[in-house]
Image (cartoon, rainbow, N blue to C red):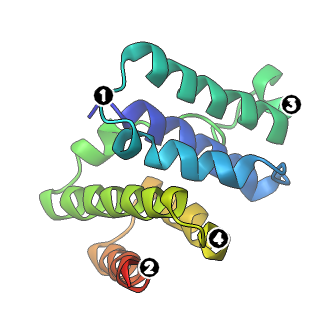
Amino acid sequence: MTEDKIISALIGLVRACNNNPKTADTDSLVIKALAFPLLCPEYDDKSLCEIVDEIYAEKNLVAPGCAVCTAPCGNTSDFDMHRIYEADDVIRKVKLRILERLQELAAYACRSRESEMIDMDFFYKALSYVSYDMGEAELLELLNETENKIGRNAK
């Protein structure tokens, strides 16, 4: 998936927010970046690079020391999407489905006048969980929670 670059960078941003305060723009950027492939289906490499650069710029505002750290811990690094693609078949499918549904939920938030009602903590949690080595049961629970949020917002 071409949008892997977006997801990879977003996971780094979300993990940076685990130990650092978000800016006033972080939440809206997370939603915008997640929804980007669905709202701009004919995007090109230039627009893809621009959205990824926005994510990096935001991450540098959230965790400015990480960009110049001489002993990086990896907490705010881009996520290696190969970890998903090389995972067990069931885990891979569930994680990809979670990401797909998060993108749909973000696109809904961008289109909706009720976007302020979106639970941003859930987006941060879900993106973080996708980056963890979790078992099938935990991931299916997250997928179910994601599906329920989609169902509630589709009404």
Q: Is residue 73 visible to the viewer in this orientation of the structure?
A: yes
**Residue 60 vertical position relative to residue 10 in the rendered view, above or below:** above
> CA separation, marks 1 and 2?
26 Å
Q: Which marked residue is nearer to the observer: mark 4 or mark 3?
A: 4
Q: Are marks 1 and 3 in contact (CB under 8 Å)?
A: no
The residue carrying mark 2 is 153
> CA separation, marks 4 and 3?
24 Å
Task: Name the spot of residue 29 as percent of width and height, x first.
Answer: 64, 45
Q: Label 4: few (<14), some or many (≥20) within 10 Å?
A: few
**Residue 13 vertical position relative to residue 98 in the rendered view, above or below:** above
> CA separation, marks 3 and 2?
38 Å
Residue 77, which numbered label? none
Q: Amino acid at mark 3?
A: Gly
- The quarter of the picture where the N terminus appears is top left
The residue carrying mark 3 is 65
- Helix, strand or loop at disc 4? helix
Q: Label 3: few (<14), some or many (≥20) within 10 Å?
A: few
Q: Which label's residue is closer to the chain start, 3 or 2?
A: 3
Q: Which marked residue is nearer to the observer: mark 4 or mark 2?
A: 2
> CA separation, marks 1 and 4?
29 Å
- The quarter of the picture where the C terminus appears is bottom left
Q: Are marks 4 and 2 in contact (CB under 8 Å)?
A: no
The image quarter in which residue 116 lies: bottom right
Q: Amino acid at mark 2?
A: Asn
Q: Amino acid at mark 1?
A: Glu
Task: Name the spot of residue 126 as percent of width and height, x first.
Answer: 49, 65
